[in-house]
Amino acid sequence: MSETTPDTMADTAPETMAPDTTAPDAAPQPAPVKALLEAVDLHKAFGPTPALDGAGLSVHAGEVVAVMGPSGSGKSTLLHCLAGILTPDRGTVRYRDVELSAMGDGPRSELRRTDFGFVFQFGQLVPELTCLENVALPLRLGSVKRKEAESRARDWLERLEVADVADKRPGETSGGQGQRVAVARALVTGPRVVFADEPTGALDSLNGERVMQLLVTAAKETNAAVVLVTHEPRVAAYSDREIVVRDGQSREMEPTP
């Protein structure tokens, strides 16, 4: 019989593995989504009167943001700076990571024809044109041929439930119909951002509700962001977030539980 020594026992004993104390790698965090449109520390005065005093906001694609505040608070001035209509005295507005104030008048105008859509309180339709021609107008200004422009315009009139007024002039329509035509005109170019300044201010509550339903639904379907200026809580209720502007300054409202 062979003799077994402690050394040979150690050689033949099974190897014991040390426990692995290395923690598993943490799951990678998704990168924050950049804002489509962002304003930071905007200041704007008209003569000695300040309209904006450090206001700002950010908007992401497909998001509806309501800008609320009393008359004279600076909310419309904020919208006009966001849209590149006004240039702030100080602060920055960035669209798709490009500063608007660094762009010339021509490129900014082009942006308002292609990437931005507008809905105003009183529609601002061209009275001499039919509703169909009004909706097709932004496309025609962008050199789209008449037949294609009017075909796309007719599609949007149908989506906004006003196809029956296509051949009427704005003066021959009701207020609710005219504002739906204005929404169709704002959306016909496939904008990334729709600016709506008191879009239901001239409508009764029933027509106002329907215009907001159609506007928000159409924008969500096309993943367009909406910047909605209003002083009416029932209109702001259609938004994802609410920004309050007062004395030229802005703050985000806490969501209601």
Image (cartoon, rainbow, N blue to C red):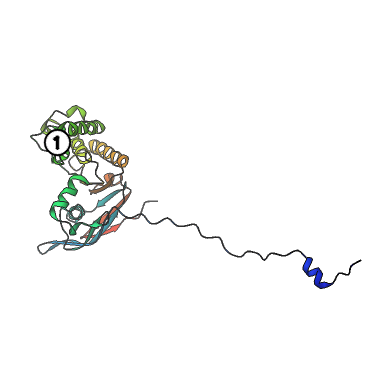
**Label 1: how many residues lie within 10 Å, few (<14), some (14-19) or many (20+)?**
many
17 displayed left or right of 5: left
9 displayed left or right of 82: right
Judge by depth and name the residue closer to the eye, 144 or 49.
144
**Residue 205, position in %: x, y?**
24, 38
Judge by depth and name the residue closer to the eye, 90 or 2.
2
Quadrant placement of the N terminus: bottom right
Identify the image quadrant of residue 199.
top left
Identify the image quadrant of residue 146.
top left
Residue furthest left in the image: 128
- Which residue occupies 16% across, 34% down? 145
Q: State the SS at label 1.
A: helix
Residue furthest front in the image: 2
**Residue 228, position in %: x, y?**
24, 48
Residue furthest right in the image: 1
- Which residue occupies 57% across, 63% down? 23
**Residue 33, position in %: x, y?**
36, 54
Asked if one can make out residue 117 in the rendered structure from this viewpoint, the answer is no
Q: How many marks on residues?
A: 1
103 displayed left or right of 65: left
Amino acid at circle 1: Asn
Identify the image quadrant of residue 38.
bottom left
12 displayed left or right of 225: right
**Residue 164, position in %: x, y?**
19, 27
Judge by depth and name the residue closer to the eye, 32 or 198.
32
Judge by depth and name the residue closer to the eye, 71 or 220.
220
The relative height of residue 185 versus residue 85 in the rendered view (above or below) is above
Asked if one can make out residue 11 in the rendered structure from this viewpoint, the answer is yes
- Which residue occupies 19% across, 52% down? 83
Mark 1 = which residue? 134
- Which residue occupies 15% across, 39% down? 143
